[in-house]
Image: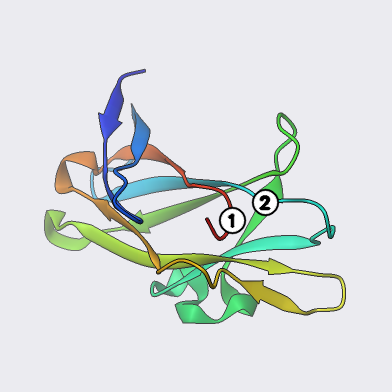
């Protein structure tokens, strides 16, 4: 699969994503992937952000990730987003760890993560591989 450079703004880093054709022309599928230290045993990792599918900044309503079967400490989850009129999509988000006690730990040492999806990526599936939790 061809690799594409996405407009990802988190620190001064551009994110490399793998793009795969095959979706609807006005939607994009995003697969979020983040490494979370497992020292304290999170019960869930959630992507929380400014989009309704990311919970509108409410961790109880965000995109819940699942532990990867392939890599210890890696959490992943999928989201499909419609974009009207072929416009670009800008998402701001953070990862949040939820523990069995229902306590949440937000990323606090870094600014909001951002991903920009250009109109040319509509109808594709994109992998958003982020830097580790809170780094």
Near-viewer residue (45 or 125): 45
Near-viewer residue (10 or 97): 10
SS category of the residue bearing label 1: loop
Residue pointed to by mark 2: 36
Residue pointed to by mark 1: 133
Near-viewer residue (131 or 71): 131
Residue occupying image coordinates x 40% and y 46%? 29
| Image coordinates for residue 37, horizontal then vertical, percent | 72, 51
Location of the N terminus by quadrant is: top left
In the displayed structure image, the side of residue 99 where residue 125 appears, left or right: left
Q: Residues at badges 2 and 1 in contact (C-beta under 8 Å)?
A: yes
User: Where 1 falls versus 64 (above or below)?
Assistant: above
| Image coordinates for residue 36, horizontal then vertical, percent | 67, 51
User: Where 48 falls versus 11 (above or below)?
Assistant: below
User: Where 119 falls versus 62 (above or below)?
Assistant: above
Res. 61 image quadrant? bottom right
Number of other residues with Cα within 10 Å of mark 1, as a class: few under 14, some 14 to 19, many 20 or more: some
Near-viewer residue (23 or 99): 99
SS category of the residue bearing label 2: loop
Residue occupying image coordinates x 14% and y 58%? 87
């Amino acid at each position: 699969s061809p690799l594409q450079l996405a407009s990802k703004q988190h620190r001064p880093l551009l994110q490399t994503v793998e793009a795969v054709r095959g979706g609807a022309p006005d939607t994009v599928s995003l697969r979020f992937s983040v490494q979370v230290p497992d020292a304290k045993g999170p019960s869930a990792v959630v992507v929380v952000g400014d989009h309704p599918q990311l919970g509108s900044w409410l961790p109880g309503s965000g995109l819940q990730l699942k532990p990867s079967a392939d890599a210890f400490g890696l959490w992943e989850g999928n989201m499909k987003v419609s974009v009207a009129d072929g416009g670009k999509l800008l998402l701001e988000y953070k990862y949040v760890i939820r523990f069995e006690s229902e306590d949440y730990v937000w990323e606090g040492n870094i600014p909001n993560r951002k991903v920009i999806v250009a109109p040319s990526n509509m109808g594709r599936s994109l992998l958003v591989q982020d830097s580790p939790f809170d780094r």
